[in-house]
Amino acid sequence: MAGRKPLLESELPLVTTALAEFCARDRALFILGLNTGFRISELLALNVGEVWDGERIRPQVKVSRAKLKGGRGLRRRSITSRTVPINEAATQALQRYLFTRLGAGALAASDPLFPSRFHGQRLTRWGANDIVHAVLAKAGIDGKADYGTHSLRKSFCRQIYKRTGNDLNLTRAVMGHASCATTQKYLHVDEEEIIAAIMGLGAGAGVGGGAELGAVCAVSF
């Protein structure tokens, strides 16, 4: 999923507006992905009891090693479980969603958090990908080939990086990466940001402005 793009800061309000037109399950899936950074396989493996204690949303979610990427493979001993706090945005989305489900009957702790429309089965990765594409289309964000479920995790990474003052090592720890090099690959730079950064160099009276450049040239020659 290396080619998937994250959402830009300016696109997030568009997504929030679009999500209002989707069902509680789809909203919860999208918002939880944006606010926890879990991979889609990890989100879809969650059970109700891992986020709900029977009365309220748990303050954090722990994903066991077996459900993490590589947790069942040859490198499983190097993989540890991952615990992520549930912030206010994710808590509210999960509350609305689970209250909706409670209206249809009691929930078992072992029930899939995100079931498919087929009774007893989990939502598939393909189904989740369709949800992401539908939300982005409603938000007016084009480029179906550029976005997918991994865009949620990349968007989370981008937001954490900015809110930690561009602290790469802290972002790495939040993401659960073993190497900062892996985290750097998630920090996609958009072409518009590149242009804005370059154009900003000549703005106002900062270094590189016309007056300073003229003075330098006068001295140099």
Image (spheres, rainbow, N blue to C red):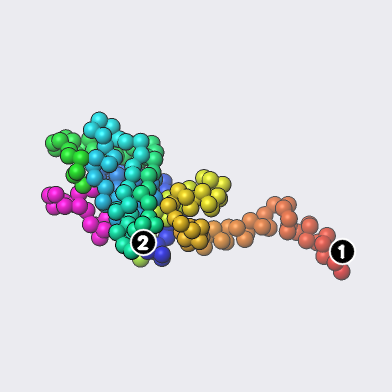
Q: Which residue is drawn at 35% across and 36% down?
A: 59
Which residue is drawn at the image coordinates 26% and 47% (left, top)? 46
Residue 125 picture quarter: bottom left
User: Which residue carries the number 1 mark?
Assistant: 219
Residue 202 in view: yes
Q: Position of residue 35 (x, y in %)?
A: 39, 45
The magenta stretch is 114-131
* Residue 137 lies in quadrant: bottom left
Disc 2 marks a residue whose amino acid type is Arg
Say which element carries label 2: loop
Whether 137 is drawn above or below 111: the answer is: below
The type of residue carrying mark 1 is Val
Please indicate whether residue 188 sits to the left or right of residue 104 in the image.
Answer: right
Q: Residue 126's x, y, as percent?
A: 25, 60
Residue nearest the viewer, comparing 143 with 29: 29
Identify the residue position indicated by label 2 in the image.
75
